[in-house]
Image (spheres, grey):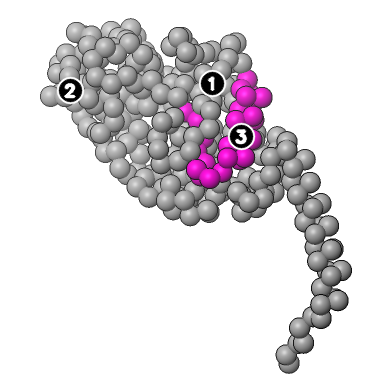
Amino acid sequence: MKHAPLKPYFLIPLLAIAATVAGANWVRAQSDNGGLDLSIELVDPKVLRVCADPRNLPFSNEKGEGFENKLAELFAAKLQKKIDYMYYPQATGFVRMTLGAHRCDVIMGFPQGDDLVQGTNPYYRTAYALISKSGSALNDVTDLNDARLKGKHIGIVAGTPPATNMAVNGLMANAKPYPLMIDTRVDSSAEAMIGDLNKGDIDAAILWGPMAGFYAKKSDPPLHVTPLVKEKTGPQLVYRIGMGVRRADQNWKRLLNRLIQENQGEINKILVGYGVPLLDENNQPIKTETASKSP
């Protein structure tokens, strides 16, 4: 059965009611988000929709065990929102298939300066790190130009920035490369590298700071981690990490920036708890007792 169209005089009160409801929703959205209207930018302003890797500890996994999971829980609690994850392996196509496809609204960790997304203010600063067995003669090596590294078998993820520093310093001949582009659901270069270090197949390992700290802390006995902050040859290995949002999402970015600023101490404590080697602007370590410092 076809329904007759509404007559004009029925439309007037309906439009008035719709306008009132829309106005109330807009006021509520503004109030809930500190005066920032997110109704246009986010598919569901009542849900924190997070883009994440399903198996990429210490960052995230489907069980919610990573520090990015914990940061998302912290922010969801502050925003009084539910959490919903869009899981996708963090390899080629990750941004396009998640944030770019509007299937989620924030990537919890993204290096500052990467133009694939719009970055928030950074919430931590860390570096690639040299990992060695505790008590090793390599424990106090602070840069890849150190003569004690000559002839050593060093694990390195191929294609990462420290590989350039290693090449400049003549360390690649004896290096053991591990693949950069992997499916994290079935493989982990970091775990393989740490396993080889513990077995004695390599003398040292170089990993991105959060991974270095996490796996060194998990090892039995724990491994020694030295952030590489004194590099004089090759690229600098210290980076600031923020969150990633779509370029059009300006109010959402402002809200995340405010949350970072207001909760930096809690953020740092989560990161330190996972062994992340946090650095201040002078490349000095941020420990638990100084965890309220900003990056």
* Residue bounds of the magenta highlight: 241-266
In the rendered image, the vertical position of residue 127 relative to residue 76, given as above or below: above
Q: Are marks 1 and 3 in contact (CB under 8 Å)?
A: no
Label 2 sits on residue: 167
- Which residue is found at the position 79% from the left and 46% from the top? 27
* Camera-side mark, 1 or 2: 2
> What's the amino acid at mark 3?
Arg
- Which residue is found at the position 32% from the left and 44% from the top? 182
- Which residue is found at the position 35% from the left and 39% from the top? 188
| Residue 1 within the segment the image draws in magenta | no
Name the quadrant of the N terminus.
bottom right
> What's the amino acid at mark 1?
Val
How many residues crowd mark 3 within 10 Å: few (<14), some (14–19), many (20+)?
some
Q: Secondary structure at mark 2?
A: helix
Q: Earlier in the sequence, mark 2 or mark 3?
A: 2
* Camera-side mark, 1 or 3: 3
> What's the amino acid at mark 2?
Ala
Q: Earlier in the sequence, mark 1 or mark 3?
A: 3
In the rendered image, the vertical position of residue 239 relative to residue 80, given as above or below: above
Say left or right for 164 vs 19: left
Label 1 sits on residue: 272
Q: Earlier in the sequence, mark 1 or mark 2?
A: 2
How many residues crowd mark 2 within 10 Å: few (<14), some (14–19), many (20+)?
some
Residue 264 spot, x, y in % from top left = 61, 22
Label 3 sits on residue: 254
Q: Secondary structure at mark 3?
A: helix
Residue 19 spot, x, y in % from top left = 80, 59
Residue 157 spot, x, y in % from top left = 28, 32
Say left or right for 171 vs 112: left
Give the spatial CA distance, label 2 vs label 3: 41 Å
Say left or right for 116 vs 263: left
